[in-house]
Image (cartoon, rainbow, N blue to C red):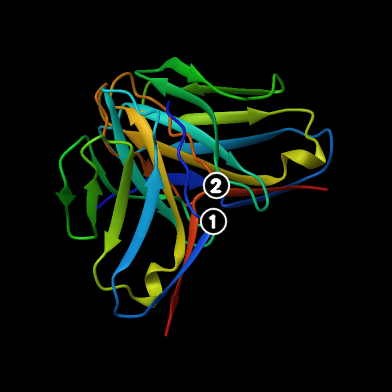
């Protein structure tokens, strides 16, 4: 799986949009970009994934650049409950592949 | 909705003892993954099973073994425990060979003294 690079930490004011960047310059054509988050020692939680088009669900939006070398996770209206470590993971969707967690971004939502 | 169940939630063992962690996947899920998360570290993949067969193996010590049973639940057996085995152990499950989401359980916190 391709490696990813994320900033180690970020702050965001409550109610504002949180934009979390991720670089994955070695991503291959069949690999998807996944985002998971982990709230203080709980099990990681799936947020969203995408291949090359922008994606949106009830939790977040995912913007993938045209060359697919980077992406941004957007939490539109951050709340205190969004404080967590956010992991950007690149993986194929076939063969029940494992998740390879990097160091992630520790997002702190400030009241 | 049913989630992944792990038991026990907390476990305290002494060095050189054995431990068994159990994972009950979401109903109809056929794939189980085990991850280990040491203190202050990120989750690391240990092993996975698809349809009761081992499908992938990560940095799992030889002292550890795991299997998936006919009802799809899985057990992680850990022998000759060491202090460094103290960690959170997460189980995740997914459905099918083309799996998008892995659903994680709440984890088992193992403390080795």
- Tag 1, which secondary structure? loop
* Horizontal relation, residue B27 to residue A58: left or right: right
Examine the rendering and report whether any part of residue A69 can be seen: yes
User: Which circle's residue, 1 or 2, is located before the other in the chain?
Assistant: 1
- Residue B4 percent across, percent down from the top left: 38, 45
Asked whether disc 1 touches disc 2, contact meaning CB atoms under 8 Å apart, the reply is yes
Q: Give the residue pinned by disc 1.
A: A8
**Residue in the foreground of this view, choosing between A45 and A85:** A85
Find the residue positioned furthest to the front: A67
Residue at the spot x=52%, y=37% of the render? B22
Tell me the chain of label 2. Answer: A
Q: Distance between the residues labelled 1 and 2?
A: 7 Å
Q: Give the residue pinned by disc 2.
A: A103
Examine the rendering and report whether any part of residue B69 can be seen: no
Residue at the spot x=24%, y=58% of the render? A60
**Image height of B86 relative to A109, above or below:** above
């Amino acid at each position: 799986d391709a490696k990813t690079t994320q900033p180690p930490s970020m702050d965001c004011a409550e109610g504002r949009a949180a934009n979390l960047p991720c670089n994955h310059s070695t991503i291959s054509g069949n690999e998807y970009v996944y985002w998971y988050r982990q709230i203080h020692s709980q099990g990681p939680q799936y947020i969203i994934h995408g291949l090359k088009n922008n994606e949106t669900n009830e939790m977040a939006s995912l913007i993938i650049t045209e060359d697919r070398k980077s992406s941004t996770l957007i939490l539109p209206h951050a709340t205190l409950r969004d404080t967590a470590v956010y992991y950007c993971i690149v993986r194929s969707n076939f063969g029940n592949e494992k998740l390879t967690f990097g160091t992630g971004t520790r997002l702190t939502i400030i009241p | 909705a049913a989630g992944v169940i792990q038991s026990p939630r907390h476990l305290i063992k002494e060095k050189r003892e054995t431990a068994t962690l159990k994972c009950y996947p979401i109903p109809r899920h056929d794939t189980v993954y085990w991850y280990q998360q040491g203190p202050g570290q990120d989750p690391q993949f240990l092993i996975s099973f698809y349809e009761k067969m081992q499908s992938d193996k990560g940095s799992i010590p030889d002292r550890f073994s795991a299997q998936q049973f006919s009802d799809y639940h899985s057990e992680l057996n850990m022998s000759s425990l060491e202090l460094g085995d103290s960690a959170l152990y997460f189980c995740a499950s997914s459905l099918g060979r083309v799996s998008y989401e892995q659903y994680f359980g709440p984890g088992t916190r193992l403390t080795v003294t």
